[in-house]
Image (spheres, grey):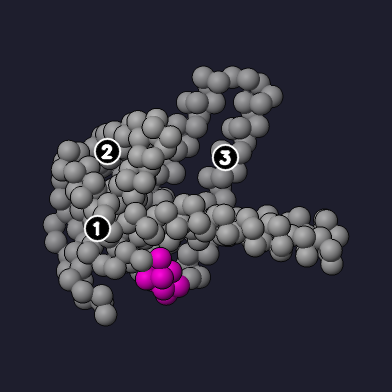
Amino acid sequence: MNSEHSTAKKINVSSTLTESWQLVSGLKLPVFLIDVIAPFCFVIVFFFIGYTLLSTFLPDVIAGPIFLIVSFLFMWLTVVVYTMLGVRRALGLPATIMASVNQCGQTFIKVMLLSLGWLIVMAAFFALGEHNVHKNDDALVFVAFLIVYIMSAPFFIFTVPLVVHNRFSILQALKQSYVMMFRNFIPIAACYILMLMILFISMIPFGIGLIWTQPMFTALGGVLFRDLFAVSLKQEK
Protein backbone atom coordinates (compact mmCIF):
# COMPACT_ATOMS: atom_id res chain seq x y z
CA MET A 1 0.00 0.00 0.00
CA ASN A 2 1.56 3.25 -1.11
CA SER A 3 0.36 6.40 0.59
CA GLU A 4 1.13 10.07 0.32
CA HIS A 5 0.42 12.61 2.99
CA SER A 6 -0.26 16.24 2.29
CA THR A 7 -1.48 19.24 4.20
CA ALA A 8 -4.90 18.80 5.78
CA LYS A 9 -7.65 20.68 3.98
CA LYS A 10 -10.06 23.11 5.55
CA ILE A 11 -13.59 21.78 5.48
CA ASN A 12 -15.98 23.49 3.12
CA VAL A 13 -19.43 22.24 4.06
CA SER A 14 -20.99 22.66 0.63
CA SER A 15 -18.08 21.04 -1.22
CA THR A 16 -17.90 18.16 1.27
CA LEU A 17 -21.61 17.35 0.93
CA THR A 18 -21.43 17.71 -2.85
CA GLU A 19 -18.53 15.28 -3.10
CA SER A 20 -20.28 12.86 -0.74
CA TRP A 21 -23.25 12.87 -3.09
CA GLN A 22 -20.98 12.27 -6.08
CA LEU A 23 -19.52 9.18 -4.37
CA VAL A 24 -22.93 7.54 -3.87
CA SER A 25 -22.76 5.56 -7.11
CA GLY A 26 -20.14 3.14 -5.81
CA LEU A 27 -21.75 2.62 -2.42
CA LYS A 28 -25.43 1.85 -2.97
CA LEU A 29 -25.08 -1.93 -3.22
CA PRO A 30 -22.57 -2.53 -0.36
CA VAL A 31 -24.45 -0.17 1.96
CA PHE A 32 -27.74 -1.92 1.15
CA LEU A 33 -26.13 -5.29 1.89
CA ILE A 34 -24.72 -4.01 5.20
CA ASP A 35 -27.85 -2.11 6.30
CA VAL A 36 -30.55 -4.54 5.19
CA ILE A 37 -29.40 -7.95 3.98
CA ALA A 38 -26.72 -8.67 6.61
CA PRO A 39 -28.97 -7.93 9.64
CA PHE A 40 -31.82 -9.91 8.06
CA CYS A 41 -29.58 -12.93 7.48
CA PHE A 42 -28.15 -12.61 10.99
CA VAL A 43 -31.62 -12.61 12.53
CA ILE A 44 -32.70 -15.63 10.49
CA VAL A 45 -29.54 -17.69 10.91
CA PHE A 46 -28.45 -16.83 14.42
CA PHE A 47 -31.63 -15.84 16.25
CA PHE A 48 -34.11 -18.34 14.83
CA ILE A 49 -31.65 -21.18 14.27
CA GLY A 50 -28.57 -20.54 16.41
CA TYR A 51 -30.35 -19.36 19.53
CA THR A 52 -32.85 -22.20 19.26
CA LEU A 53 -30.00 -24.71 19.15
CA LEU A 54 -28.19 -22.98 22.00
CA SER A 55 -31.32 -23.06 24.14
CA THR A 56 -31.74 -26.74 23.36
CA PHE A 57 -28.30 -27.76 24.60
CA LEU A 58 -27.55 -25.01 27.13
CA PRO A 59 -29.53 -23.45 29.99
CA ASP A 60 -30.90 -19.96 29.35
CA VAL A 61 -28.48 -18.45 31.86
CA ILE A 62 -25.62 -19.43 29.50
CA ALA A 63 -27.38 -19.26 26.12
CA GLY A 64 -28.65 -15.72 26.80
CA PRO A 65 -25.23 -14.10 27.40
CA ILE A 66 -23.72 -15.96 24.42
CA PHE A 67 -26.49 -14.60 22.21
CA LEU A 68 -25.93 -11.04 23.50
CA ILE A 69 -22.16 -11.21 23.01
CA VAL A 70 -22.43 -12.56 19.46
CA SER A 71 -25.10 -9.98 18.59
CA PHE A 72 -22.95 -7.18 20.01
CA LEU A 73 -19.85 -8.26 18.09
CA PHE A 74 -21.87 -8.62 14.88
CA MET A 75 -23.20 -5.06 15.26
CA TRP A 76 -19.74 -3.71 16.03
CA LEU A 77 -18.08 -5.40 13.03
CA THR A 78 -20.91 -4.10 10.86
CA VAL A 79 -20.19 -0.56 12.08
CA VAL A 80 -16.46 -0.95 11.35
CA VAL A 81 -16.98 -2.35 7.84
CA TYR A 82 -19.62 0.32 7.16
CA THR A 83 -17.18 3.05 8.21
CA MET A 84 -14.37 1.65 6.09
CA LEU A 85 -16.63 1.46 3.03
CA GLY A 86 -16.94 5.26 3.17
CA VAL A 87 -13.21 5.70 3.71
CA ARG A 88 -12.28 3.42 0.84
CA ARG A 89 -14.73 5.12 -1.51
CA ALA A 90 -13.35 8.55 -0.61
CA LEU A 91 -9.80 7.32 -1.25
CA GLY A 92 -10.69 5.82 -4.61
CA LEU A 93 -10.18 2.24 -3.43
CA PRO A 94 -12.56 -0.66 -4.21
CA ALA A 95 -15.52 -0.04 -1.91
CA THR A 96 -16.65 -3.64 -1.54
CA ILE A 97 -17.61 -5.46 1.62
CA MET A 98 -14.94 -8.12 1.08
CA ALA A 99 -12.19 -5.53 0.59
CA SER A 100 -13.30 -3.70 3.75
CA VAL A 101 -13.45 -6.94 5.74
CA ASN A 102 -9.97 -7.92 4.56
CA GLN A 103 -8.58 -4.53 5.54
CA CYS A 104 -10.22 -4.68 8.97
CA GLY A 105 -8.85 -8.20 9.43
CA GLN A 106 -5.30 -6.85 9.22
CA THR A 107 -5.85 -5.03 12.52
CA PHE A 108 -8.37 -7.48 13.96
CA ILE A 109 -7.12 -7.45 17.56
CA LYS A 110 -7.21 -3.65 17.76
CA VAL A 111 -10.64 -3.62 16.11
CA MET A 112 -11.90 -6.00 18.79
CA LEU A 113 -10.38 -3.86 21.54
CA LEU A 114 -12.13 -0.82 20.06
CA SER A 115 -15.41 -2.65 20.60
CA LEU A 116 -15.09 -1.68 24.27
CA GLY A 117 -15.63 1.93 23.23
CA TRP A 118 -18.73 0.88 21.30
CA LEU A 119 -19.93 -0.95 24.41
CA ILE A 120 -19.54 2.21 26.53
CA VAL A 121 -21.51 4.27 24.00
CA MET A 122 -24.28 1.67 23.79
CA ALA A 123 -24.44 1.44 27.59
CA ALA A 124 -24.78 5.22 27.81
CA PHE A 125 -27.65 5.28 25.31
CA PHE A 126 -29.34 2.36 27.09
CA ALA A 127 -29.03 4.10 30.47
CA LEU A 128 -30.53 7.28 29.03
CA GLY A 129 -33.41 5.32 27.55
CA GLU A 130 -34.07 3.61 30.88
CA HIS A 131 -33.95 6.98 32.65
CA ASN A 132 -36.54 8.39 30.27
CA VAL A 133 -38.84 5.41 30.81
CA HIS A 134 -38.82 5.90 34.58
CA LYS A 135 -38.53 9.71 34.82
CA ASN A 136 -40.27 10.75 31.58
CA ASP A 137 -37.97 13.78 31.25
CA ASP A 138 -37.85 14.11 27.48
CA ALA A 139 -36.02 17.45 27.32
CA LEU A 140 -33.22 16.39 29.65
CA VAL A 141 -32.82 13.02 27.96
CA PHE A 142 -32.70 14.65 24.51
CA VAL A 143 -29.89 16.98 25.64
CA ALA A 144 -28.06 14.03 27.20
CA PHE A 145 -28.47 11.99 24.01
CA LEU A 146 -27.10 14.91 22.01
CA ILE A 147 -24.07 15.23 24.28
CA VAL A 148 -23.33 11.49 24.10
CA TYR A 149 -23.72 11.57 20.32
CA ILE A 150 -21.33 14.51 19.94
CA MET A 151 -18.78 13.01 22.33
CA SER A 152 -18.86 9.64 20.56
CA ALA A 153 -18.85 11.00 16.99
CA PRO A 154 -15.03 11.25 16.65
CA PHE A 155 -14.74 7.64 17.76
CA PHE A 156 -16.78 6.42 14.80
CA ILE A 157 -15.74 8.98 12.18
CA PHE A 158 -11.99 9.09 12.82
CA THR A 159 -10.75 6.57 15.40
CA VAL A 160 -11.85 3.48 13.46
CA PRO A 161 -10.15 4.47 10.16
CA LEU A 162 -7.06 5.75 11.97
CA VAL A 163 -6.65 2.31 13.54
CA VAL A 164 -7.64 0.26 10.49
CA HIS A 165 -6.18 2.34 7.66
CA ASN A 166 -3.37 4.35 9.27
CA ARG A 167 -2.44 1.56 11.72
CA PHE A 168 -2.34 3.97 14.68
CA SER A 169 -2.35 2.62 18.20
CA ILE A 170 -5.74 2.90 19.88
CA LEU A 171 -4.63 5.64 22.29
CA GLN A 172 -2.95 7.61 19.52
CA ALA A 173 -6.04 7.28 17.32
CA LEU A 174 -8.36 8.41 20.10
CA LYS A 175 -6.20 11.44 20.89
CA GLN A 176 -5.91 12.50 17.25
CA SER A 177 -9.64 11.95 16.66
CA TYR A 178 -10.81 14.20 19.46
CA VAL A 179 -8.20 16.88 18.78
CA MET A 180 -9.26 17.00 15.12
CA MET A 181 -12.96 16.96 16.00
CA PHE A 182 -12.80 19.93 18.33
CA ARG A 183 -10.49 21.90 16.06
CA ASN A 184 -13.06 21.56 13.29
CA PHE A 185 -16.22 21.22 15.35
CA ILE A 186 -18.35 23.83 13.56
CA PRO A 187 -17.88 22.59 9.95
CA ILE A 188 -18.14 18.92 10.99
CA ALA A 189 -21.30 19.62 13.00
CA ALA A 190 -22.73 21.62 10.09
CA CYS A 191 -22.04 18.73 7.69
CA TYR A 192 -23.80 16.20 9.90
CA ILE A 193 -26.73 18.44 10.82
CA LEU A 194 -27.41 19.05 7.13
CA MET A 195 -26.85 15.36 6.37
CA LEU A 196 -29.36 14.34 9.05
CA MET A 197 -31.87 16.79 7.57
CA ILE A 198 -31.31 15.25 4.14
CA LEU A 199 -31.77 11.77 5.59
CA PHE A 200 -35.00 12.82 7.31
CA ILE A 201 -36.42 14.36 4.14
CA SER A 202 -35.44 11.29 2.12
CA MET A 203 -37.48 9.07 4.47
CA ILE A 204 -40.74 10.89 3.75
CA PRO A 205 -41.65 9.16 0.44
CA PHE A 206 -41.75 5.64 1.96
CA GLY A 207 -38.03 5.76 2.68
CA ILE A 208 -37.14 5.30 -1.00
CA GLY A 209 -34.72 8.22 -0.88
CA LEU A 210 -32.56 6.33 1.63
CA ILE A 211 -31.27 4.26 -1.29
CA TRP A 212 -29.20 7.34 -2.19
CA THR A 213 -28.89 9.29 1.06
CA GLN A 214 -27.66 6.43 3.26
CA PRO A 215 -24.63 5.83 1.00
CA MET A 216 -24.11 9.60 0.99
CA PHE A 217 -23.96 9.51 4.77
CA THR A 218 -21.40 6.70 4.55
CA ALA A 219 -19.27 8.65 2.07
CA LEU A 220 -19.41 11.79 4.21
CA GLY A 221 -17.37 10.20 6.99
CA GLY A 222 -14.80 9.02 4.47
CA VAL A 223 -14.44 12.43 2.85
CA LEU A 224 -14.01 14.14 6.22
CA PHE A 225 -11.42 11.58 7.32
CA ARG A 226 -9.47 11.90 4.06
CA ASP A 227 -9.44 15.70 4.06
CA LEU A 228 -8.83 16.35 7.75
CA PHE A 229 -6.09 13.77 8.12
CA ALA A 230 -4.59 14.58 4.73
CA VAL A 231 -4.76 11.00 3.51
CA SER A 232 -4.30 10.30 -0.18
CA LEU A 233 -3.83 6.88 -1.67
CA LYS A 234 -2.75 6.14 -5.21
CA GLN A 235 -3.04 2.41 -5.26
CA GLU A 236 -3.66 -0.43 -2.84
CA LYS A 237 -1.47 -3.45 -3.46
Secondary-structure class at tag 1: helix
Q: Position of residue 172 (x, y in %)?
A: 37, 60
Regarding residue 149, the answer to whether it shows in the image is: yes
What is the tally of numbered marks visible in this picture? 3
Q: Which residue is mark 3?
A: 124
**In the figure, is residue 36 to the left or right of 10?**
right
What is the CA distance from the residue labelled 1 to the residue labelled 3? Answer: 31 Å
Viewport quadrant of the N terminus? bottom left
Neighbours of disc 1 within 10 Å: few (<14), some (14-19), many (20+): many
Q: Position of residue 110 (x, y in %)?
A: 47, 67
What is the CA distance from the residue labelled 2 to the residue labelled 1? Answer: 16 Å
Instruction: Give whichever of 15, 184 is nearer the camera.
Output: 15
Q: Which residue is mark 2?
A: 191
Q: Which residue is mark 1?
A: 90
Q: Residue at x 78, y 65 (%)?
A: 53
Q: Are marks 2 and 1 in contact (CB under 8 Å)?
A: no
Viewport quadrant of the C terminus? bottom left
Q: Amino acid at mark 3?
A: Ala
Q: Residue at x 34, y 50 (%)?
A: 215
| Disc on the earlier residue, 3 or 2 | 3
The mark lying in front, picked from 1 and 3, is 1
| Disc on the earlier residue, 1 or 3 | 1
Q: Amino acid at mark 2?
A: Cys
Secondary-structure class at tag 3: helix
Would you place residue 101 above or below residue 117 in this image? Answer: below
**In the figure, is residue 135 to the left or right of 215?**
right
Magenta stretch: includes residue 98:
yes
Q: Amino acid at mark 1?
A: Ala
Q: Please provide the residue range marked out in magenta.
A: 97-107
Q: Residue at x 50, y 32 (%)?
A: 145
Q: Quadrant of residue 14?
A: top left
| Disc on the earlier residue, 2 or 1 | 1
